[in-house]
Amino acid sequence: MNLKSLAGIAVAALGGWALVAIFHEPAKAHAPVAWESSKQCAECHRQVHDEWSGSWHAQAWTDEEVRKLSENFSNTDCIDCHAPQPVFETGIGNRPLARSTRRAEGVDCISCHQMKDGRMAGTLDNPTVPCRPSAQRELNRPESCGGCHNQHGTVDQWKASRYAQPGPGFQDCVSCHMPLRDPADPSKGRVHVMHGGHDIELVRSAVALRVTRAEGVPVVEVENVGAGHNYPTDERSRASDIFWRELASDGTKGEWRKLYRFRNPYRFEVGEPNTELPAGQTITLRIEDELARREIEVALFYKLSPYYADPARPDPEREAALVHSARLAP
Amino acid sequence: MKRALVLLALSAACAEEAPQSSTPAPVVARDLRDVARANVVRLEAEVGPLAEPASEDAELVEHVTGLLEAVESASLGRVAREELASLAPASLPILARWLDDAERPAAQRSAAIEALGSADTRYSAEKLLARIEAMRTRKNDEAWVRAHCAWRLGQGTQDWIVPRMIRQMRYETDHETVIWMARALARFGNLSGLDALYVVRQKSSAQELRDSANLALYELARERGFDAPEALSSAWFSSDGRLPAPTLSGARQLEIWRVVAGFAEWQLRGVDDGRFTLARENPAAAALLAEALSDENRYIRTHAAQSLERMGARGRAAGPALLAALDDPEAGIFLAEALGGVGYAPAEAELVARLEPPRSLEVRTAAARGLASLGLPSSAAALDRHTGESAPRDLRFSAGCARLRCSPADAPLALVEWLVTDYATGTGETYSSEPALRTWYAARPNADLPAWDSAPGSTPGERIRVRVELLRAALGAGR
């Protein structure tokens, strides 16, 4: 069912004010609506709403990690992007600012779509429906994500990558994070779940792990093959660690030993370098350890928050998610 | 450049009913202009550049080096120090190099700090302050050097160090340095370091530092005629005229305007630091922030308002300016909250008026937040109109919190129950409902406030659970 046929049904559910939309002659522009909640969009945009509801954007206010770090948002600095004013109102590419209402809805439909004049930025113009969509090229540009996602340079990283080069290889934020619902029919729109680090399958697609030996010494390569920006990107709490351990012939496994960490440190972690892996790049590491000449396992883990319970004896299997692993014979 | 901007006060539907079309907007004209940068330029000209003293000649270098190297000598040390304390400005860069050179012996670097401190010029203070700030970009920066520099800055007359030292408080990890910075700030009439002293007194692992923070707290209080540090803190936060109000030198105003101008930047680090810094400045800074409310840049207006809000009573002098700009269509919601934050009671009527349609829900909600912080009993009746079930949820919530804070004793129990239910989820706006519910709870006859305040602080969730139990018990008793 497409949206136009949906509108008739859904509008009926919305009550008198919306009925105006269909019983007026079709060309008549709809009066502006003062939207109070993104729940109102669900009436007509059910599928988008369901997808968004399961996204981390919808969780931006309720997210337990955020609430812990912001002391339940009593650090009001954190409201700016986690409950922002519509980004078209503050200006695409500008820094977002906090809003005063519907904070619990986090980064919602209105945050991304509503324009200064109350119309909704979309891919088409239709002044006759209540949301009055208006075709805006800016909506799917990286800059529209960038107000919130470029503080740590994700958009800049993308711009420096091959994905930003015009041509067949071009892929932007929307092509990777909002795939078409039906690649054969773009009019069916884009998935609004916007997977990121919480989706380990997406993380797996970002990197390749290769392990070989050079004169007996294990050589570990990690290549950023699938992220359109650094790996891991954006949120500084993310970290990805390479560990290795001995696999004894009797089947016992040695302790995990840390080889390398990909991460952009927090502001206060003075002097720590940013070791994220840029798009398309490969890092090559050697395990200079006698033990590593035996049979070993090398594994890449991903962590949503950076610290291990016991830094001296990290337990990545329990405290992080496995991305890739490889065995290496002696 | 002067640019008149016609501001359209955005208006929107009367939202008690279903959303409907917006009414024509009233037009308000206000002059917005380049305020922050213009002030930076003006003050830079007035204060003059921070000139590096004229290039030093080889003879001078040799002389100063000789003195520094002699400070450890038993026979020449004292004379060397005396001479270092009265060096000509041209020697200051040599001393600064010594200070920054970690390879030099500690005694020589200390002597350099002392000499720079005695010089007490803008240049020498800049060098000492920059040495303290370097810990934010340099790993393993030596804490003793920072502590010594902070102490020395507190002996001088360079009040412009205040904003930058406040910012440094946000990052400083060395407790001894914190103590000396708090004292230096106090020397220039800024008592924002008291908070840090309480923390060191309570949390430092070294007894010596805990004692030293305690001593500082008592000395600062007594020097200002107070028996106890808590009384001094209260005088600082209530800004009720019991503390002397130092005027800000041009150089300090320049530092403040630099921070304000920085609000326009895209990177948040400086903005977060800026809000932190200005929120802890002296009452005199409020006049500058008030002026910034006319800046043409919305970020400057917005963050200036937020800084004022966080200044609390110390920002009250900006009340009239905030009120005059209240209908700023971009920053208005922040101004409404700031009026409450600074406690500007004359704003009550205007905030009450903005609870009503045709103002947008954003403005109405922000007005309720402002009234909550003002906490005037006379607002209760107006708030009551928006706390019913038919009110838009956000307005009902903010007006409800305000209602409890303005007149807790007679707040409708159904409203309190609704707010408690929301609070119990732990995912709402607990930073608004928590103080409101505390005010309501405190007004109950058998309130156990110590139990409320000592609710375990390990996680917000645990704290909320304990408080919800207290609230439910009080609600039960109220029926």
Image (cartoon, rainbow, N blue to C red):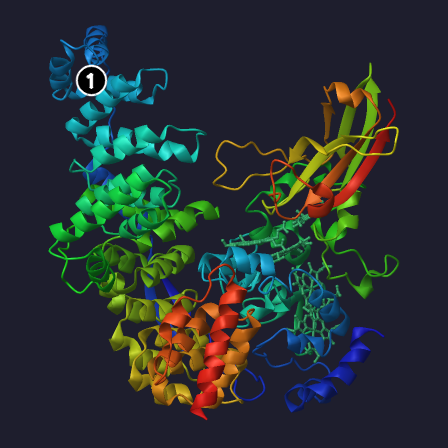
Q: Which quadrant, please, contains the C terminus of chain A? A: top right
Q: Position of residue A18 (x, y in %)?
A: 67, 86
Which SS class for mark 1? helix
In the image, B128 versus B223, the foreground residue is B223
Describe residue B55's horizontal placement relative to residue B405 as left or right. left
In this rendering, the answer to whether A71 lies above or below B382 is: above
User: What's the residue at 44%, 82% (across, down)?
Assistant: B400
Does residue A228 show up? no
Does residue B404 show up? yes
| Mark 1 Cα-neighbour bin, 10 Å: few <14, some 14–19, many ≥20 | many
Q: Position of residue A19 (x, y in %)?
A: 69, 88
Q: Which quadrant, please, contains the N terminus of chain A? A: bottom right
User: What's the residue at 53%, 66% (across, down)?
Assistant: B462
Amino acid carrying mark 1 in the image: Ser
Q: Position of residue A291 (x, y in %)?
A: 77, 22
Describe residue A20's horizontal placement relative to residue B414 as left or right. right
Describe residue A14's horizontal placement relative to residue B340 as left or right. right
In the image, A89 versus B161, the foreground residue is B161
Q: Position of residue A157 (x, y in %)?
A: 64, 39
Circle count: 1
Identify the image quadrant of residue A122. bottom right
Describe residue B305's horizontal placement relative to residue B419 as left or right. left
In this rendering, the answer to whether B25 lies above or below B430 is: below
In this rendering, the answer to whether A139 lies above or below B146 is: below
User: What's the residue at 35%, 35% (across, down)?
Assistant: B133
In this rendering, the answer to whether A109 lies above or below B52 is: below
In the image, B211 versus A307, the foreground residue is B211
Q: Looking at this view, name the residue that lies furthest to the bottom.
A: B479
| Residue behind mark 1 | B91
User: What's the residue at 71%, 57% (across, down)?
Assistant: A194
